[in-house]
Amino acid sequence: MTEQPKRRWARLHHEVMVAVETENHGGFSGSSTSVSEGSCFINSPVAPPVGERVSVLLQLPGQPECKLSGRVVWSQPAGPSIDEAGMGIEFIETDEPTRALLGRVIGQLTQDLKSAPA
């Protein structure tokens, strides 16, 4: 049995709204269902090419919009056998206060979701 590699940061599996702006492919909005201090998955039928730099605006609950720079590291186009079309974004050039804010918000939301009644 192969052991899964451990992720570098804890992930929040909760929907947050995002807006993405690219230099070559315009802007679009969608949602993210997986966010960490270093990356996110964005649900969207539109995906810039792998390697393209993007600007990401995350709308974290209870926080002002969080502006991040990123790079598309993988994409999954919409199709008949695809459950979630979208792309993986790696955050780059993130300053320490922004990374710390992401870590705090993700940690708090994760705790809140665990203690919420089902």
Image (cartoon, grey):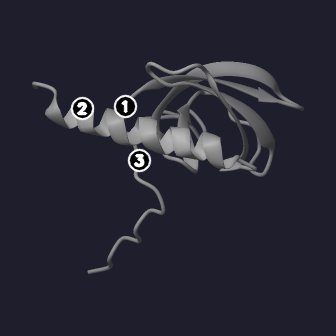
Examine the rendered structure and indicate whether residue 83 appears above or below residue 91: above
Lateral position of residue 111 relative to residue 43, left or right: left
Crowdedness of circle 3 by 10 Å Cα count: few (<14), some, many (20+)?
Answer: some
- Counting labels gives 3
Along the viewing direction, whichever of 68 and 18 lies nearer the viewer: 68
Farthest residue to the front: give it: 97
Percent of width and height locating residue 7: 44, 62
* Occupied quadrant, residue 48: top right
Along the viewing direction, whichever of 104 and 14 lies nearer the viewer: 104
Identify residue for label 3.
Answer: 11
Residue under the image location 19 percent in, 37 percent down:
114
Verify CB contact (< 8 Å) between mark 2 and mark 1: yes
Identify residue for label 1.
Answer: 14
Q: Quadrant of the N terminus?
A: bottom left
Crowdedness of circle 2 by 10 Å Cα count: few (<14), some, many (20+)?
Answer: few
Identify residue for label 2.
Answer: 113
Question: Of the residues shown, which amino acid type is indicated by label 1?
Answer: His
Question: Of the residues shown, which amino acid type is indicated by label 2?
Answer: Leu
